[in-house]
Amino acid sequence: MSSQTPTTPAAREPLSVERVLRAALALADAGGTHGLTMRGLGQELGVEAMSLYKHVANKDAILDGIVDLVVAEIALPAPDEDWRAAMRRRGIAAHQVLLRHPWACALLMSRPTVGPAMLNYVDSTLASLRRAGFTVAQADHAANAMDSHIYGFTLQKLNSPFDPDQYAEAAATYLPQLPPGSYPHIVEMATQVMAGEYDGVIDFTFGLDLTLNGLERLLRTP
């Protein structure tokens, strides 16, 4: 008769705010926030939905929490960094992070998120601009102008009906549908895209640099 050693199931990792939010972030990345429910989140974590309320107040708290996790991925300006280099790096980093989390951009624009990561993000941005010599009002306007470009460009890219490698094909499809002799500048641009002389890809840094150029001129104006 063989003896058997009883096995003990592995201890389940205890719930915490961090664990709940990380699971919610993964669900949002996989399917957006519309389908993110307390019940679905509980199933993902292997617990009853009611157990979640010991750690998060409601779905709104979860949305605020996962937005803050996303913002925490954006590199902050360093205290000794040149303001323009810092703002350019910040803008590119924010754009890349928001592309990784396609649902986050709309929430950032629509919710009064005041989590610690967002507060650090905003405060470090204003600090960099104030150190450079911008007034309080100018720093606020500058941050808003940059964020408008970041959010707007990101949403445009996320909602584009074509991938960059489809631009030439799209031009070849739609160009023959235009009335002959009309829209000459569109025809000119589409022809160059079709010929491979211009890729037609919208450039995030083009608009960002234009904004930074304008801010630099503002800073130099007495």
Image: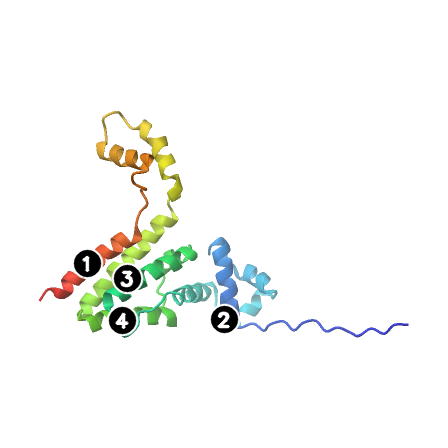
Image coordinates for residue 151, horizontal then vertical, percent: 32, 56
Indicate the secondary structure of the residue bearing disc 4. Answer: loop
Task: First in sequence, mark 4 or 1: give its number.
Answer: 4
The reply to whether discs 4 and 2 touch (Cβ–Cβ < 8 Å) is no
Q: From this view, report whether residue 171 is shown above or below residue 49.
A: above
Q: Residue at x 31, y 52 (%)?
A: 153
Q: Tag on residue 213?
A: 1
Q: From this view, report whether residue 80 is shown above or below residue 28.
A: below
Where is residue 107, by image quadrant? bottom left
Indicate the secondary structure of the residue bearing disc 1. Answer: helix
Alpha carbons under labels 1 and 2: distance apart: 40 Å
Task: First in sequence, mark 4 or 2: give its number.
Answer: 2
Can residue 55 be seen in this snapshot? Answer: no
Alpha carbons under labels 4 and 1: distance apart: 17 Å
User: Residue flagged by tag 3: what amino acid is it?
Assistant: Arg
User: Residue flagged by tag 2: what amino acid is it?
Assistant: Glu
Q: Which residue is mark 4?
A: 81
Q: Residue at x 58, y 73 (%)?
A: 14
Say which of 51 and 29 sits in front: 29
Q: Which residue is mark 2?
A: 18
Task: First in sequence, mark 1 or 2: give its number.
Answer: 2
Alpha carbons under labels 3 and 4: distance apart: 11 Å
Task: First in sequence, mark 1 or 3: give its number.
Answer: 3
Indicate the secondary structure of the residue bearing disc 3. Answer: helix
Image coordinates for residue 216, horizontal then vertical, percent: 17, 62
Alpha carbons under labels 2 and 3: distance apart: 31 Å
User: Residue flagged by tag 4: what amino acid is it?
Assistant: Glu
Q: Quadrant of the C terminus?
A: bottom left
Task: First in sequence, mark 3 or 4: give its number.
Answer: 4
User: Residue flagged by tag 1: what amino acid is it?
Assistant: Asn
Mark 3 neighbour class, 10 Å CA radius: few under 14, some 14 to 19, many 20 or more? some
Say which of 54 and 18 sits in front: 18
